[in-house]
Structure formats: C-alpha cells, structure tokens
Amino acid sequence: MSVGTLSAVGASTLRLHGDLEVRQAAAARRAVRDFLDAADAGLHVVVDLSGVEELDAAGLAAVTSPVLAACRGGRAVSVIPPMAARPRRVADQIGVLPIGTG
C-alpha cells in the first residue's frame, strides 16, 4: 500500500493505492487517523480508495472506522470507493460505502 496526499482550496485528499488487506490494515488505519488529525477542521476531507487493487474486510474497516468517527464528530468527510472490480465488489458486499458528509 502506498499513501499520498493532495491539498486544494477548501479540501484535502488522502489517496491510498495498492493492496489494502489485513496485512496493511494497521498502517492504513494509522495513515487515515493521522491525516484526519492533521487536516484543518474547516476543510472538506476526502479519502480516495480509487487506486486500491486488493481489499478485504479488515482493510475496509481500517479506513471506514476512523472516517465514521470523524463524521460523527461533525467533520466533512467523503470516501471515493475502489474502482477495480474485485475491491469494489468487496466494498459493495460489506455495504459501508458510500460515506459522505459534504
């Protein structure tokens, strides 16, 4: 898994690429939490999973858990779902995406 960030006026994006499975779950959770903690509270925050190639329930939970906590705390957060067929199917089967508050 690789992680990248992008900032624009009014928004900040965290992009995750590659595999997001149980082996990468702890690192992904840390990356998402650190990103959310560092982002200006007034910014719309986006977690972009469109580059994820492999996904399992542990990887998806590692991302969605801190995102849902941020949403409950009033943050404007959206998640862009995976684009590849297999990870998209996993996300669809689990049923937690889409997430979006703004």
Image (cartoon, helix red, strand yellow):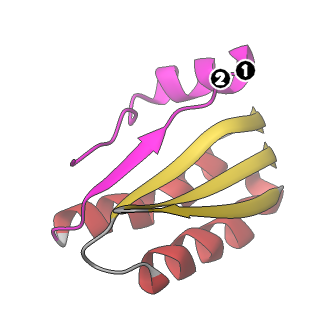
Q: Tell me the amino acid under the disc marked 2.
A: Met
Secondary structure at badge 1 equals loop
Residue 61 sits inside the magenta stretch: no
Find disc 1 in the rendering and name its residue. Answer: 84
Q: Which residues are magenta?
A: 74-102
Secondary structure at badge 2 equals loop
Q: Tell me the amino acid under the disc marked 1.
A: Ala
Location of residue 61 with respect to 25 vertically, above or below: above
Q: Residue at x 30, y 67 (%)?
A: 69
Q: Position of residue 79 (x, y in %)?
A: 44, 44
Q: Quadrant of the N terminus?
A: bottom right
Where residue 100 sits, quadrant-wise, is top left
Q: Position of residue 90 (x, y in %)?
A: 60, 25
Q: Residue at x 50, y 21 (%)?
A: 93
Question: Callout 2: few (<14), some (14-19), or many (20+) C-alpha neighbours within 10 Å?
Answer: some
Q: Position of residue 74 (x, y in %)?
A: 15, 68
Q: Position of residue 59 (x, y in %)?
A: 65, 50
Marks 2/1 in contact by CB < 8 Å: the verdict is yes
65 or 31, which lies in front?
Answer: 31
Cα distance in 3D space between marks 2 and 1: 4 Å
Q: Is residue 20 visible?
A: no
97 or 90, which lies in front?
Answer: 97
Is 53 left, or right, of 82 in this rendering? right
Find disc 2 in the rendering and name its residue. Answer: 83
Q: Residue at x 61, y 61 (%)?
A: 6
Question: Callout 1: few (<14), some (14-19), or many (20+) C-alpha neighbours within 10 Å?
Answer: some
